[in-house]
Image (cartoon, rainbow, N blue to C red):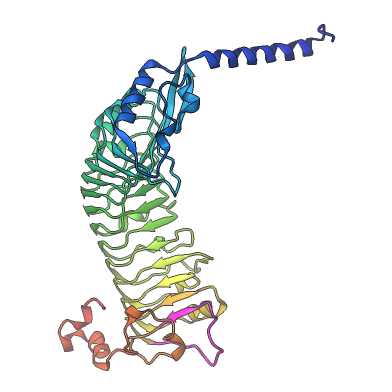
């Protein structure tokens, strides 16, 4: 073999260095600090019967980094340090872990990712997690964690994702948490958190706070936001602060007490689903410009159970699943909506429980098999094809009594009936 060839010599040198590096890596041991922390962490948790996560955590093993489930290590200085820890398997057939989270987690000072998979872990989130200055992801979901969101987490300047959803956390959101410079994803859904939401000054992309007890208005939100859900809270106030959020692609404010008109810029195909049902929103469904936006496959707009009034504009024609029922809408159904149903572009069109006075279906064949059209309990006798797909909640009455319709148009003649929220 010609070792005088410089290219060949370089190749063998690289191979030698790689083998030397691997040999050295094999002789490195896990940091004693990390090993002791892992022992304490394991002592505070246990496998629920049916889970085998900790079966690999044998502390007599010469190399925990390669044998312990859920562990990722990296060489830092002259030792192996734990850089990622996943507690539990996350598999659908695994019941997960029970016990509590040990404050010793904070001793894994090189941790960049901490995950707790669904289980029955109880107790508070250790405030000592605020010492994990290198951590980028904390996900502690679907357990029974209690107490507040630790204010100490506001010290984690590298934190990108914080997911504490589906627990039993209480208290309010620490105002400093929503100022973290690197935070992009904040998920606190399905807890018992309360109070008003603090302003969000970080360039957040994803904010999910649904199913809590938050109240008050929407706070100042960043222009970067793409996903926003605060459904099933007790929030109130107008929606005008959303008009500048041009990057939103998902909005769910349902089941709150928001009021006032729906800003016209929210009616755009790039924002779907648009879920505003069961609030106190009023005003009309307004056009956004001279041309009608073109909604496509999979689009969902739910404005049901509000106090929307006036005649429908064609702005939402073409939405695949459109819910406008239980409002105060009047006039005739625009032909654009009818055409969209017959084309198959709109598969669900719920208009029941309004004050609509007419719809023109013409002498046409039956609706497509995929279409669900409900027109019951309006100020007209709907065609039969507008009743067959009505949900049970629409009731059995085909039309409103005439006195309700006349009283709605002339509310002074029947007290306050005309401004009452539809059932």
Q: Residue at x 76, y 10 (%)?
A: 9
Q: Is residue 164 above or below residue 398?
A: above
In the drawing, does residue 299 fall left or right of residue 252?
Answer: right
Image quadrant assignment for residue 5:
top right
Q: Is residue 67 above or below residue 312?
A: above
Q: Residue at x 42, y 39 (%)?
A: 52
The stretch drawn in magenta includes residue 369: yes
Give x and y (percent) for residue 161.
39, 39
In the drawing, does residue 369 fall left or right of residue 257?
Answer: right
Give x and y (percent) for residue 304.
34, 71
Q: Residue at x 59, y 17 (%)?
A: 22
17 and 64: which is toward the camera: 64
* Highlighted magenta segment, given as a residue range: 358-374
Q: Is residue 349 above or below residue 141?
A: below
Quadrant of the frame with the N terminus? top right
320 and 84: which is toward the camera: 84
Give x and y (percent) for residue 247.
44, 51
Q: Main secondary structure of the magenta part?
A: loop
Give x and y (percent) for residue 268.
46, 62
């Amino acid at each position: 073999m010609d070792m005088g060839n410089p290219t060949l010599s370089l190749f063998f040198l690289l191979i030698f260095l790689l083998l030397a590096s691997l040999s050295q890596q094999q002789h490195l041991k896990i940091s004693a600090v990390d090993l002791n922390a892992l022992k304490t962490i394991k002592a505070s948790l246990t496998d629920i019967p049916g889970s085998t996560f900790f079966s690999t955590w044998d502390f007599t093993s010469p190399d925990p980094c390669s044998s312990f489930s859920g562990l990722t290590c990296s060489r830092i200085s002259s030792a192996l340090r734990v850089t990622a820890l996943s507690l539990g398997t996350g598999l659908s057939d695994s019941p997960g872990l029970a016990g509590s989270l040990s404050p010793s987690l904070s001793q894994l000072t090189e941790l960049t990712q901490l995950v707790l998979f669904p289980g029955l872990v109880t107790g508070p989130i250790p405030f000592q997690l605020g010492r994990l200055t290198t951590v980028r992801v904390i996900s502690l979901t679907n357990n029974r964690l209690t107490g507040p969101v630790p204010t100490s987490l506001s010290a984690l300047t590298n934190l990108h994702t914080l997911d504490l959803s589906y627990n039993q956390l209480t208290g309010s959101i620490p105002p400093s948490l929503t100022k973290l410079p690197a935070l992009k994803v904040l998920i606190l859904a399905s807890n018992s958190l309360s109070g008003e939401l603090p302003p969000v000054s970080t360039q957040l992309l994803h904010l999910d706070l649904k199913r809590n007890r938050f109240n008050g208005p929407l706070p100042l939100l960043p222009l970067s936001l793409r996903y926003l859900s605060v459904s099933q809270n007790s929030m109130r106030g107008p929606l005008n602060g959303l008009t500048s959020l041009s990057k939103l692609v998902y909005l769910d404010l349902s089941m709150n007490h928001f009021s006032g008109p729906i800003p016209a810029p929210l009616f755009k195909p790039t924002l779907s689903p648009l879920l505003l049902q069961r609030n106190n929103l009023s005003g009309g469904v307004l056009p956004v410009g001279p041309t009608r936006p073109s909604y496509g496959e999979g689009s969902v707009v739910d404005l049901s159970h509000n106090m929307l009034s006036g005649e429908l504009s064609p702005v939402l024609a073409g939405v695949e699943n459109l819910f406008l029922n239980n409002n105060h809408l009047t006039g005739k159904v625009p032909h654009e909506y009818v055409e969209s149903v017959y084309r198959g572009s709109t598969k669900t069109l719920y208009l029941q429980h309004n004050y609509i006075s007419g719809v023109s279906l013409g002498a046409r064949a039956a609706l497509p098999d995929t279409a669900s059209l409900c027109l019951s309990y309006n100020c007209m006798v709907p065609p039969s094809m507008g009743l067959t797909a009505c949900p049970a909640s629409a009731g059995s009455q085909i039309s409103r009594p005439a006195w309700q319709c006349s009283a709605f148009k002339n509310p002074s003649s029947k007290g306050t009936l005309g401004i009452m929220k539809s059932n």
